[in-house]
Amino acid sequence: MEITAAMVKELREMTGAGMMDCKKALGETDGNMDEAVEYLRKNGQAKAEKKAARIAAEGIVRIALDGDKKAAIVEVNSETDFVAKNEKFQSFVERVAESALSTNATELDDFLKDSLAGDSSKTINEELVSQVATIGENLKIRRFEKAEATDGILVDYIHGGGRIGVVVVAKTAVTDDTVKEALKNIAMQIAALSPKYIERKDISAEFIDHEKEIIKAQIMNDPKESQKPEKVIAGMIEGRISKQLKEICLLDQVYVKAEDGKQTVAKYLEEISKKVGSTVAVERFIRFETGEGLEKKNEDFAAEVAAQIGG
């Protein structure tokens, strides 16, 4: 199968690996993108997380609240940072968030057919089209999600003027200022360190087994590490998977405000629970980062790739 510059470009964005490594991986896997990602990971040339998830795109995240019981979070994209900072654009996104708070829709296409908050004469999509015509840039309502606290409260946090938005839902019988401040701190933690799960029990055994296979392949492809005794290799695998899980599980992460630099989020919540006399537990969180998985315009990149790989 012919390996094109566009394929190399896509794989490079997904993995962060070098262009020649990407070309080789695609050649070894007959152009199968998923298998090429696995090939690069096993050979230690790609990271576990896709680099594309960190590529920036413009726009903002906004959150609408109904007290401390309900929330809706939305992401709306623009072509430029200039528009993202525009007051008219931001006002539009806030109305989209308010609309999401009251919608019964679960899919984006259905949500766009809803009436816009504050103006029942037009749908959200109609107002979007109007905003595009007025602002002069392509705008996109990319995603929305709702949250509700049925046995506790929720808090929100916006970072960087709307670059990241977080909603944390907690189960707690006490909802005083101490608890709210603690949950706001947890929301800041999520914004900063981007966990994928609350705790390890939320992770499937299949995911863990798959990651262990990747780690083992990396070890066996290392000339020095592969020569170590089987028992030592098994210990290395367990150690590395444990470290990886600590990074992606909220409760296992080191609390960003820990005075000793060691206290985990789980221990911090235990401390707060003891202080208020009631268990405070995170039930759910939502984290939107503007532009996750999106690519900024770069018309010359494919040509650059083609030149470096010889077509």
Image (cartoon, rainbow, N blue to C red):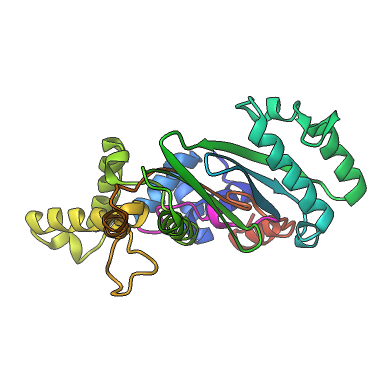
Say if residue 203 shows up in the picture.
Answer: no
Magenta residues, start to end: 44-58
Q: Position of residue 179 (x, y in %)?
A: 41, 54
Say if residue 270 shows up in the picture.
Answer: yes
**Residue lying furthest bottom:** 260
Q: Position of 55 compared to 151: left or right?
A: right
Q: Position of 182 compared to 206: left or right?
A: right
Q: Position of residue 301 (x, y in %)?
A: 68, 59
Instruction: Tell me if residue 52 is in the magenta stretch.
Output: yes
Q: Position of residue 86 (x, y in %)?
A: 81, 59
Tell me which residue sits at (81%, 37%) in the image.
118
Quarter of the picture containing the N terminus is top right
Q: Main secondary structure of the magenta part?
A: loop
The one of 170 and 216 positioned closer to us in this rendering: 170
Quarter of the picture containing the C terminus is bottom right
Q: Position of 287 compared to 104: left or right?
A: left
Instruction: Tell me if residue 102 is in the magenta stretch.
Output: no
Q: Is residue 89 above or below residue 144?
A: below
The one of 137 and 222 positioned closer to us in this rendering: 137
The one of 236 and 80 positioned closer to us in this rendering: 80
